[in-house]
Amino acid sequence: EVVLTQSPASLSVSPGESATLSCRASRSVGSSLAWYQQKPGQAPRLLIYLASARATGIPARFSGSGSGTEFTLTITSLQSEDFAIYYCQQYNDWPRTFGQGTTVDIK
Amino acid sequence: QVQVVQSGAEVKKPGASVKVSCKTSGYTFTSFHLSWVRQAPGRGLEWLGWTSPYNGNTIYAEKYQGRLTLTTDTSTTTAYMELRSLRSDDTAVYYCARPGAGSAFDYWGQGTLVTVSS
């Protein structure tokens, strides 16, 4: 199966600053990669699909890039509601797999 | 609008089975497959399997083969996940999820907590 490794495991950021999250795949997944945001007690919310396309209603401060095995989620000008756990997920191969998550918390 | 509503929390004893439902509405049920994902307390997301309401096809994560059954009922636009021989480490929130654009999971149920305890 495709193993997704996210880094860092956690990230402390001040409101208004930017955050860069990484997701590395054990083999190429093309552009079939998504990013999700999850807050405590809530289901995950799709942010980015096809590596760089923003899902409906997602603010422009969220952007995704990459292809193959290296992917990045960038959040610019972090707002209070952005502090959460972020997961990457590949849907190129079976089984579908998720990264272990990156926690973005307030510095 | 698309809605995905799951059944309520369950408490089961080890060795028992659980069946979670996922009622959908707001779209053509047979046009989109559904996946099931679980999250153990304090842990990450784990994909369990996939089902096609169109033809009943399924794909399961290897570790759940033989213990997991995914089904759909087109008459009620509901999907079901049954997990058998439950163990304490099956305690988790179980989600159903439907793709939107690009096959990523755009619509999620609210989650169903399954607690396995003697």
Image (cartoon, coloured by chain):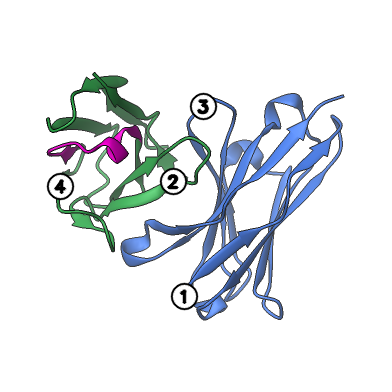
Tell me the subunit letter for badge 3. B
Provide the residue designation for mark 3. B43
Range of magenta residues: A72-85
Identify which residue is drawn at 62% across, 39% down.
B93
Q: Nearer the viewer, mark 3 or mark 4?
A: 4
Q: Which chain does the green colour mark?
A: A
Q: Which mark is residue B33?
A: none
Judge whether residue A4 is colored magenta. Answer: no
Q: Is residue A25 visible?
A: yes
Query: Which kind of residue does numbered mark 3 sit on?
Result: Arg
Image position of A102 with respect to A57: above or below:
above
* Depth check, front residue: A26 or A70: A70
* Depth check, front residue: B9 or B81: B9
* Depth check, front residue: A38 or B54: A38
Q: Are marks 3 and 2 in contact (CB under 8 Å)?
A: no
Identify which residue is drawn at 70% across, 76% down.
B76
Both on one chain, marks 2 and 1?
no
- Secondary structure of residue under mark 1: loop
Provide the residue designation for mark 1. B1
Query: Which kind of residue does numbered mark 4 sit on?
Result: Arg
In space, the residues marked 3 and 2 are separated at their CA atoms by 13 Å
Q: Are marks 3 and 4 in contact (CB under 8 Å)?
A: no
Provide the residue designation for mark 2. A44
Query: Which kind of residue does numbered mark 1 sit on?
Result: Gln
Identify which residue is drawn at 59% across, 69% down.
B24
Q: Are marks 3 and 1 in contact (CB under 8 Å)?
A: no
Label 3 neighbourhood size at 10 Å, few (<14), some (14-19), many (20+)? few
